[in-house]
Image (tube, rainbow, N blue to C red):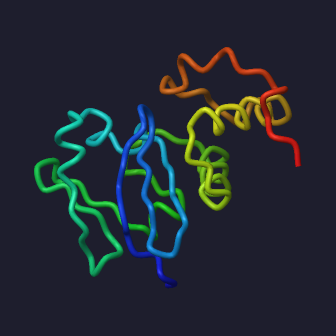
Amino acid sequence: MGNEMVKNVSFSRDAIVVDLLDGRTISAPLAWFPRLLHATPAQRKGWKIAGGGFGIRWEELDEDLSTEGLLRGAPAPGAVKTRAASNLFYVLSLANLRNFRQFYQIYKNLKLHFSGHFTQPQHFSGCNKISTQDLPHP
């Protein structure tokens, strides 16, 4: 295990964003963590670093996440996900894409190429005005 210790936790409308001490940022959809998804903003802010710096604990929600699990793309037990979406989130976390809009742009483009391997979760609603022209070019 490298220096995957938690520095900060924040939330976008649809994702949890975890900044690590080594400079990386992990982003995962809130849909993978139903307790966080249904929590109030105040409850989400009630996190503390746990597990020797490698975990996050929400006492009021009885929710625990680890940086190892987030880096592997591991949702909470019972959360709905596909393997393809898990792999995509892992790649995006490595690419340090913090913005869910950026994720959706890439997701939409990949969906055209891998039809049938992705399911579009409800938390992408409202992002349907993005075109492939908005995608960054290498």
Q: Nearer the viewer, residue 86 or 44?
A: 44
Q: Residue at x 44, y 74 (%)?
A: 21
Is 113 located above or below residue 65 in the figure?
A: above
Q: Position of residue 67 (x, y in %)?
A: 42, 67
Q: Nearer the viewer, residue 137 or 107?
A: 137
Number of residue marks: 0
Q: Position of residue 98 (x, y in %)?
A: 56, 47
Is 34 located above or below residue 98 in the figure?
A: above
Q: Position of residue 33 (x, y in %)?
A: 36, 45
Is 137 located above or below residue 13 in the figure?
A: below
Q: Residue at x 47, y 82 (%)?
A: 3
Furthest toward the left, the residue is 60
Quarter occupied by residue 119: top right
Q: Residue at x 22, y 56 (%)?
A: 47
Left or right: residue 121 compared with residue 91: left
Q: Position of residue 36 (x, y in %)?
A: 29, 42
Q: Residue at x 44, y 34 (%)?
A: 14
Furthest toward the right, the residue is 138
